[in-house]
Image (cartoon, helix red, strand yellow):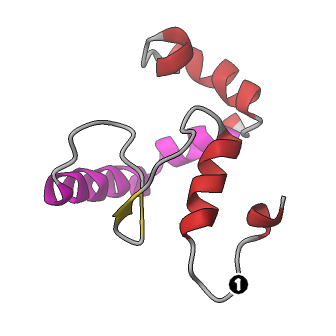
Amino acid sequence: MESEHHSKNINFAKPCAEKAGIDYGQIEACASSERSGKVMQYIAEQSTNAKVQYYPDIRVNGAETQGDYTTVKGLVKIICDGYNGDKKPAACDE
């Protein structure tokens, strides 16, 4: 929404989700849940602790990452490259 429309206006959320191939219904359900506030609070605390200077500041296993933040595919690659668990998620095999 920010890169294409230069806006955080909720009216752009559904078209942006569709363009990215993301189910807007899931976004809407998450955003209206009680858990979303807890997640945002956690992110704010982690950002303060990590002394985040800019967004997006994506960290995997506590380490700052570099890569293409402008697409879902690029974001998945960043996460998969930093993943060190026993079994990589199926999305990492695509």
Residue 66, position as x, y percentages in the image: 47, 48
Q: Which SS class for mark 1?
A: loop
Q: Quadrant of residue 91?
A: bottom right
**Range of the magenta residues?**
25-50
Residue beneath the point at 15% across and 60% down: 49
Amino acid carrying mark 1 in the image: Lys
Q: Quadrant of residue 53?
A: top left
Horizontal arrangement in the rendering, residue 1 relative to residue 92 (left or right): left
Q: Is residue 19 magenta?
A: no
Is residue 17 placed above or below 75 in the rendered structure?
above
Say which of 53 and 39 sits in front: 53
Say which of 37 and 64 sits in front: 64
Q: Quadrant of residue 18?
A: top right
Residue 33, position as x, y percentages in the image: 47, 50
Residue 87, position as x, y percentages in the image: 70, 84
Residue 55, position as x, y percentages in the image: 34, 37
Q: Is residue 31 magenta?
A: yes
Mark 1 closeness class: few <14, some 14–19, many ≥20 residues within 10 Å = few
Horizontal arrangement in the rendering, residue 51 relative to residue 41 (left or right): left
Horizontal arrangement in the rendering, residue 93 relative to residue 86 (left or right): right
Is residue 18 placed above or below 60 in the rendered structure?
above
Instruction: Give the total number of marks visible in the rendering.
Output: 1
Residue projecting furthest to the front: 66
Residue beneath the point at 84% across and 58% down: 94
Residue projecting furthest to the right: 94
Residue beneath the point at 60% across and 64% down: 81
Residue beneath the point at 23% across and 50% down: 44
Which residue was labeled with disc 1?
Answer: 87
Horizontal arrangement in the rendering, residue 6 relative to residue 13 (left or right): left
Say which of 8 and 6 sits in front: 6
Query: Main SS type for the magenta part?
Result: helix
Is residue 71 placed above or below 93 in the rendered structure?
above
